[in-house]
Amino acid sequence: GIDICESYKRQGFDTSVEVCIHYLVFDEENTVRERGGLAKGNPPIRSSVEKEKLWHFLAAGAIDLVSTDHVAWSLDRKNNPDMLANASGGPSLEVMVPALVKGCMDRGVDLSIAARVLAHNPARHFRLAGQKGALAVGSDADFSIIDPALAPWRVAASKTVSDWSLYDGMELPQIKESYLRGTRIWDGKNVLNLAGSGHFLRPSIWGAGR
């Protein structure tokens, strides 16, 4: 699929490649076999060989976006012994950034690639370049400060409504602070901004900033 998209890109088509974070973290041999329905996704989590191929494509710049496919199912929707009877997907919004950073650190992938697929490219994709996706004069000061020291991530201490997570107990870097438009909105433990503090952003005309 990535080869097909690369072919379209070479022909000048506006084509993008997205991968969800769980396909970069988990694999069939370990996660699916050990966790059963908790690891059910659509499409399924693949082998460790396929996972590492995705990392190769990411490091080579062939993957444009990393996302979550986040869905906060309760445990009773994911613990049926019959794999096919379980809902697909799971919570991952809070762990996307630290999980991707850890994967990059483990493989020697430059962290600028993480910034590109998490911020720069999404801003371009949604036609918000110039205001979002970069630390530059005239752009919003949206950024996070990450401590690379690993610590166990616990779903019990998270902000998700789900009572389970495939990432529970995983050793991950820590997001110490996050800023939105220059204002601190996360202090490492608490969400500081208030509901309604967001701003509507009007996308640029098609093609501008891409």
Image: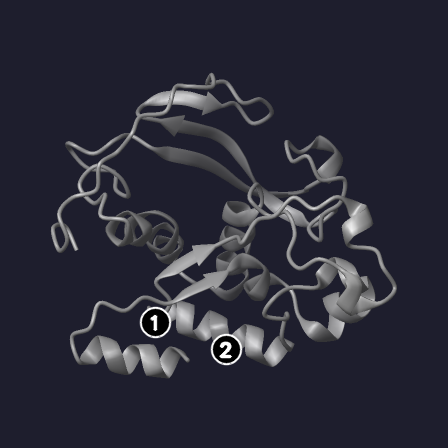
Residue 136 drawn at (x, y percent): 19, 37
Residue at 31 percent across and 26 percent down: it is 199
Q: Which amino acid does label 1 sit on?
A: Ala
Q: Which amino acid does label 2 sit on?
A: Lys
Q: In this view, does 38 lie above or below 62?
A: above
Q: Residue 21 carries which label?
A: none
Residue at 25 percent across and 31 percent down: it is 140
Q: Is mark 2 on a helix, strand or loop?
A: helix
Is 43 in front, or is 167? Answer: 43
**Is disc 1 surrounded by few (<14), some (14 to 19) or many (20+) residues within 10 Å?**
some
Left-right relation of 55 to 188: left
Q: Is residue 99 above or below residue 109?
A: above
Is 184 in front, or is 6? Answer: 6
Q: Is mark 1 on a helix, strand or loop?
A: loop
Residue 23 drawn at (x, y percent): 57, 65
Measure the alpha-carbon separation of dots 2 and 1. 11 Å
Q: Which mark is residue 53?
A: 2
**Quadrant of the rendered image containing residue 106:** bottom right
Is 22 in front, or is 153? Answer: 22
Considering the image in quadrants, where does the C terminus appear? bottom left
Q: Name the residue under label 1.
A: 62
Q: In this view, does 79 lie above or below 93?
A: below
User: How was this image coloured?
Assistant: one colour
Residue 1 drawn at (x, y percent): 41, 80
Residue at 36 percent across and 24 percent down: it is 198
Is 153 in front, or is 192? Answer: 192
Left-right relation of 147 to 13: right
**Is disc 2 surrounded by few (<14), some (14 to 19) or many (20+) residues within 10 Å?**
few
Residue at 32 percent across and 23 percent down: it is 182
